[in-house]
Image (cartoon, coloured by chain):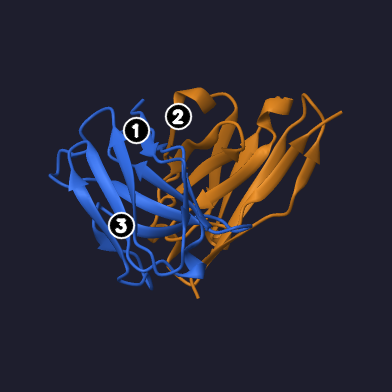
Chain colours: A blue, B orange
Amino acid sequence: DVVMTQTPPSLSVAIGQSVSISCKSSQSLVYSDGKTYLHWLLQSPGQSPKLLIYQVSNLGSGVPDRFSGTGSQKDFTLKISRVEAEDLGVYYCVQATHFPWTFGGGTKLELK
Amino acid sequence: QVQLQQSGAELAKPGSSVKISCKASGYTFTSYYISWIKQTTGQGLEYIGYINTGSGGTNYNEKFKGKATLTVDKSSSTAFMQLSSLTPDDSAVYYCEGPYWGQGTLVTVSS
């Protein structure tokens, strides 16, 4: 299975600060159709995960443009500009290029 | 609105089985496959497999073959996952996922 390594495991931030989360895969995530099925999820406290970004850089429905995703092949980054209180929770990267999907270990975003 | 509504929490005894449901609304059920994901504190998020809601075809993570059985009832727009021969290691929150994630179903296996 593809191993997804996510760093850091936790982040303590102040409201208004910008942060980045890294996700590295053990294999290239480029599928045979040329697309890269690397997505980012946010699990807010007590909630189920919600899709934030799909295929590396596309914002999910209703997701503010403070969120952005970049990367290619095996190296990906989620950036949150101007963190707001509603952004707190655990962020996961997930690859859906290779079966089975595999998830990063999560990055917990907390208030400083 | 588009949503996946899962059945309620289950308390089961070791060796028994449970069947979780995931009812879709707000969209054409057969437009999305339904995936199932297990979440535990220790192992994080694990992908169980998916079902093609149109054909009923399935694909399972090797780790969950023999443990999970995925089915679908198109007439009620509902997907199901049966977990068999339960052990304490099966205690987890289980999510269905399609256009969105369901709210999760807590399964607790205890004697």
Q: Is the C-beta separation of discs 3 and 1 under 8 Å?
A: no
Nearer to us: label 2 or label 3: 3
Q: Chain of mark 1?
A: A
Q: Nearer the viewer, residue A99 or B28?
A: A99
Q: Is the C-beta separation of discs 1 and 2 under 8 Å?
A: yes
Task: Name the residue rendered at 45%, 68% in the picture.
Answer: A15
Q: Which residue is mark 3?
A: A79
- Real-space CA distance between mark 2 and mark 3, rounded to the nearest whole angstrom: 31 Å
Q: Give the amino acid at mark 2.
A: Asn
Q: Position of residue B26 (x, y in %)?
A: 49, 72
In-image side of A43 versus A81 (left or right)? right
- Real-space CA distance between mark 3 and mark 1, rounded to the nearest whole angstrom: 27 Å
Q: Position of residue A70 (x, y in %)?
A: 21, 52
Q: Secondary structure at mark 1?
A: loop
- Residue B86 can be seen, yes or no: no
* Same chain? Circles 1 and 2: no
Q: Give the amino acid at mark 1.
A: Phe
Q: Secondary structure at mark 2?
A: loop
Circle nearer the N terminus (3, 1): 3
Q: Which residue is mark 1?
A: A99
Task: Name the residue rendered at 36%, 25% in the picture.
Answer: A1
Task: Name the residue rendered at 38%, 33% in the picture.
Answer: A100
In-image side of A102 versus B81 (left or right)? left
Nearer to us: label 3 or label 1: 3
Q: Which residue is mark 2?
A: B61
- Quadrant that contains the C terminus of chain B: top right
User: Is residue A101 placed above or below B62 in the rendered structure?
Assistant: below
| Image-quadrant location for residue B70 | top right
* Same chain? Circles 3 and 1: yes
Q: Chain of mark 2?
A: B
Q: Secondary structure at mark 3?
A: strand
